[in-house]
Amino acid sequence: MFFSKKNKIHDQIFIFEENNLSMIKRFIFSSLFLIGFLVMLQASIVDTVKVFSLSMQKEIKTVVITPDSYSQKSEFPVLYLLHGYGDNYSGWVNKAPVVKELVDLHDMIIVCPDGAYGSWYFDSPVDPKFKFETFVSKELVDWVDKNYKTIKNREGRAITGLSMGGHGGLYLGFRHQNIYGACGSMSGGVDIRPFPSNWDLAKRLGSQREYPDNWEKNTVMNQLHLLTPNSTKIIIDCGTGDFFYDVNVKLHKELLYRNIPHDFISRPGVHNWEYWANAIKYQMLFFSEFFRGK
């Protein structure tokens, strides 16, 4: 009887411990699920919207990323982030999803408009269907300011991009200093003149041989006279193995010659998403400090 009773007590203790362990497992699982759910609730929100362009008479798809704090504040700075040649409005969020985390980290809105297949973000002098300077720097900015809680002045706006979008970031930033207080470029085609046969440029400007003035007037390198030193914050980033590296170094030296302050980042890397997913971290830190007045 004694041993039978002891075994019974032992069995009860074992069952109690097993039940406790099961309860602990359920508690841990429930806690992890709750944490994951709360993280999802607090994550940045990615919307795809359609913005009508009066100048081009069509709707342009645009990604807008808002931070998790969007409901808690009255206004946010905006970074206009441009894609490269052959890509579209969804390129940044799909191929460098780190931007969604950076939006929360730096508490800003990101806007990624569709730049079509080779717009180069200027108003084409030969094709009226391409008015992307007007769209991005006028129509889109007005639409975003109307529909989102933005800081509605140049101190709350910046623009940058990669490759063709890097050209667009500086081209629009230099030409519209009343709209953007800061601008940048990652692996940007900052001087288009050495590439007369590439990336649909001749379709947008006419051939360089027949329309040389179009090429001279629409390259970043020939916009520097518009800049007022210390007025616009500028950041340029290009990998040493990039085919645009030489023109970026040339731009950097010309800015130095003109005594125009800017950040120039050069490190090993080529023209690919691995480089840009890293470069955007430096750029957003730069723009975040600009927005905070540092």
Image (cartoon, rainbow, N blue to C red):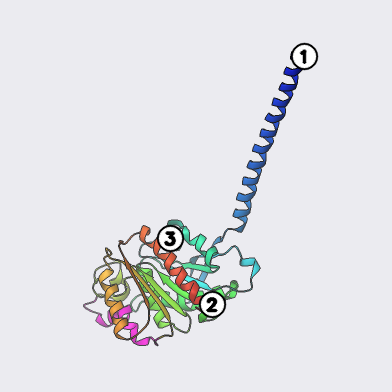
Regarding residue 52, the answer to whether it shows in the image is: yes
Looking at the rendered structure, the kind of residue marked 3 is Gly
Between 89 and 5, the one nearer to me in the picture: 5
Residue bearing the label numbered 1:
2
Q: Residue at x 64, y 66 (%)?
A: 71
Number of the front mark, 3 or 1: 1
Residue bearing the label numbered 3:
91
Task: Give the percent coordinates (x, y) of residue 250.
Answer: 26, 76
Q: Is residue 104 one of those drawn in magenta?
A: no
Q: Secondary structure at mark 3?
A: helix
Give how far apart the Cα atoms at labels 1 and 2 are.
87 Å
Between 102 and 191, the one nearer to me in the picture: 102
Q: Residue at x 30, y 62 (%)?
A: 268
Residue bearing the label numbered 2:
142
Q: Is residue 277 left or right of residue 62?
A: left
Q: Is residue 216 one of those drawn in magenta?
A: yes
